Amino acid sequence: MSNKGESFFAGVILGAAVGAVTALLFAPDKGKRTRKKLNRKVRELNDAMDEVYLKSKDSFTHLSEDVEDNINDLAKKGKKILAGK
């Protein structure tokens, strides 16, 4: 997933969570029930953000491996060129 896609996904999750929390706080419900709902929504947000973090970490790992491979290939090509001179 691209960095823009991950940022968008994180923004959507955050926006949904803020909307849900706002709705819970303004809903006419008992305090105990509202706190339970709020706690559940916070846990869901935490789980979703963990997922975004893990996907971002995985993408970064793949990207860094690709960069390292490209640098090694360039170094080998450079050594061959220098050895040929």
Image (cartoon, grey):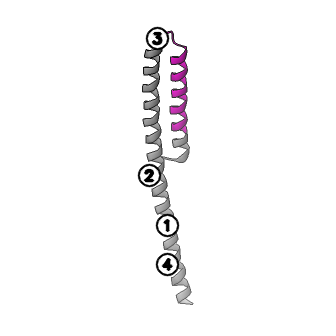
Distance (Cα) linking label 3 and label 1: 57 Å
Instruction: Answer above or below: position of 76 versus 15.
Output: below
* Residue kind at label 4, given as amino acid type: Lys
* Residue kind at label 3, given as amino acid type: Lys
Q: Which residues are magenta?
A: 8-30
In this rendering, the label closer to the viewer, 1 or 4: 1
Q: Residue at x 53, y 17 (%)?
A: 25
Distance (Cα) linking label 2 and label 4: 27 Å
Please count the marks in the image.
Answer: 4
Residue nearer the viewer, 27 or 83: 27
Circle number at residue 68: 1
Tell whether 3 sits left or right of 54: right
* Residue kind at label 2, given as amino acid type: Asp
Q: Is residue 18 magenta?
A: yes
Read off the residue under disc 4. 76
Dot 4 lies on which element? helix
Rendered location of residue 36, percent (x, y): 42, 21
